[in-house]
Image (cartoon, rainbow, N blue to C red):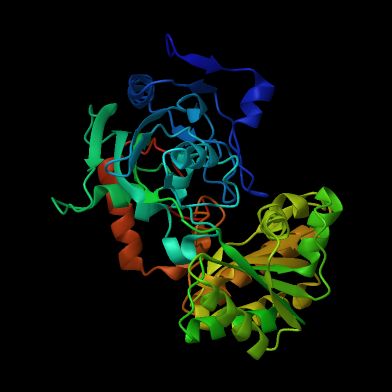
């Protein structure tokens, strides 16, 4: 069907390529997976699929947590992992041009050699790809101070659809310049669209100069996660802006330590980790804010290995918890002043449903990741977990927040998104989808549409 392009039909390999890491999200049965190496390959696949009305689901490393890369019945999985070249690093203009299969950490390492830095750093950075980061507008630990993926995407090359017969067209969106307002921001529209508007084949990224000082870490220990949330709100009130401000509860730390033996222990129910890359005064001010908010203790780490172990524990939190059983992962974001109340609400939901809900968070920007853990094969608790999942989404909306801060809508959050957005806004989104993809072949059933489909 796709001459000259690597095509996979082996059932076991196809199954592995047909889903991301989202628990209990529906996975369709694809007819094949293809591994393009060039933009021309992608355009050829899209054109052939459009002619036959075959759905196309693009995927990167499959690290997503919302079902956004899950296959659909009768569709083709477009595995972008072979399009993994860094095409250009322009040091004069601090720009990189990459294919979508480039791994986030590989890009960081490559630009670091040129004295540059690519800040977006999701916890999955050692494995996730730039294409997947673009698809979900990924954030990460440093986004509190330095922004999310959208803030670094200057331009895109994409294979798109449009009017009948136009499928397979290659377009270039955006620019390489720092400024540019010629027409609508179609680049921004594609970032976070989860592959529902076309297939991204090249990304032009803004870079920053490498940080000149080693970040310092401030650690605060708290009696419970709500008290830690109060410290986050206090840092905001005092105008403190660390590069990262992360929360881990005791259950998460214990799971990571049991697995990886990093030497990280906690004598409290929650830890806040602040990373400061400005000056010693700000680090001291954050430690004071922690103490004034009731921290059991707050210290500045003078040992870079200890500091790295703490942040490694934060990055390993999800896979560590996953070893304990199926994990349904939330991704809500609320105003920073509402973080304490939202953490208290999550505790209440856990108690009402008799569930274990561990909590990690990019607490500094209000992006909370409650991890709902259930024993494998326990259908009763699975139903309770799914009910708690929806209650947490509704609570975030009620707090003036959103159902997804960085993981995307995919399949799991469509119901929540439909509750969050007004009918008029939902209709606008549907109209954009229908205009750019009238045959509805690009990742159909994700993000827009009826959540009961």
Q: Residue 348 is drawn in which quadrant?
A: bottom right
The answer to whether 221 is drawn above or below residue 324 in the figure is: below
Nearer to us in this view, 305 or 441: 305
Give how far across and how far down residue 170 sits, in percent: 26, 29
Q: Is residue 275 left or right of residue 374?
A: left
Nearer to us in this view, 234 or 332: 234
Give how far across and how far down residue 311 sits, in percent: 66, 58
Nearer to us in this view, 137 or 194: 137
Give how far across and how far down residue 228 sits, in percent: 67, 79
Seen at 33% across and 24% down, the residue is 43
Seen at 49% across and 62% down, the residue is 405
Residue sitting at the far right: 258
Seen at 62% across and 72% down, the residue is 391
The answer to whether 305 is drawn above or below residue 9 in the figure is: below
What quarter of the picture does the N terminus occupy?
A: top left
Q: Looking at the image, can residue 366 be seen?
A: no
Q: Is residue 300 left or right of residue 102?
A: right
Give how far across and how far down residue 336 sits, in percent: 51, 78
Q: Is residue 18 left or right of residue 351?
A: left
Q: Residue 305 is drawn in which quadrant?
A: bottom right
**Total number of numbered discs in the rendering:** 0
Seen at 70% across and 67% down, the residue is 248
Residue sitting at the far top: 4
Q: Looking at the image, can residue 358 be seen?
A: yes
The answer to whether 313 is drawn above or below residue 354 in the figure is: above
């Amino acid at each position: 069907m796709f001459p000259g392009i690597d095509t996979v039909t082996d059932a076991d390999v196809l199954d592995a390529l047909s889903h991301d890491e989202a628990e209990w999200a529906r996975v369709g049965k694809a007819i094949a997976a293809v591994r393009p190496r060039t933009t021309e390959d992608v355009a050829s696949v899209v054109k052939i699929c459009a002619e036959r009305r075959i759905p196309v689901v693009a995927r990167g490393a499959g690290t997503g947590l919302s079902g956004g890369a899950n296959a659909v019945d009768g569709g083709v999985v477009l595995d972008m992992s072979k399009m993994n070249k860094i095409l250009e690093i322009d040091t004069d203009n601090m720009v990189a041009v990459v294919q979508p299969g480039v791994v986030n950490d590989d890009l960081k390492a490559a630009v670091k050699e040129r004295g540059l830095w690519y800040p977006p750093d999701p916890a999955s950075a050692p494995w996730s790809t730039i294409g997947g980061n673009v698809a979900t507008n990924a954030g990460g630990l440093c986004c509190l101070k330095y922004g999310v993926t959208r803030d670094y995407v200057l331009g895109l090359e994409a294979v798109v659809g449009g009017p009948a017969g136009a499928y397979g067209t290659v377009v270039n969106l955006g620019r390489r310049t720092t400024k540019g307002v010629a027409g609508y921001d179609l680049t921004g529209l594609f970032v976070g669209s989860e592959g529902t508007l076309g297939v991204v084949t090249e990304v032009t990224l803004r870079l920053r100069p490498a940080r000149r000082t080693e970040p310092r870490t401030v650690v605060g220990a708290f009696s419970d996660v709500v008290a830690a949330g109060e410290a986050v709100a206090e840092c905001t009130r005092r105008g403190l802006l660390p590069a990262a401000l992360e929360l881990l509860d005791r259950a998460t730390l214990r799971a990571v330590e049991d697995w990886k033996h990093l030497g990280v222990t906690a004598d409290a129910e929650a830890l806040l980790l602040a990373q400061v890359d400005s000056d010693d005064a700000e680090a001291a001010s954050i430690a004071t804010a922690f103490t004034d908010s009731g921290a059991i203790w707050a210290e500045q780490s003078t040992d870079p290995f200890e500091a790295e172990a703490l942040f490694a524990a934060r990055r390993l939190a999800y896979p560590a918890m996953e070893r304990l059983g199926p994990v349904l992962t939330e991704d809500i974001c609320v105003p920073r002043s509402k973080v304490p109340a939202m953490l208290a609400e999550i505790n209440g939901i856990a108690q009402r449903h008799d569930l274990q809900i561990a909590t990690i968070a990019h607490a500094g920007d209000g992006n909370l990741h409650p991890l709902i853990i259930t024993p494998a094969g326990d259908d009763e608790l699975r139903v309770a977990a799914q009910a708690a999942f929806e209650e947490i989404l509704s609570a975030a909306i009620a707090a003036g927040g959103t159902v997804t801060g960085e993981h995307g809508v995919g399949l799991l959050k469509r119901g929540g998104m439909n509750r969050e957005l007004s009918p008029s806004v939902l209709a606008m989104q549907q109209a954009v989808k229908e205009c750019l993809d009238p045959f509805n072949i690009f990742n159909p059933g994700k993000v827009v549409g009826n959540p009961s489909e």
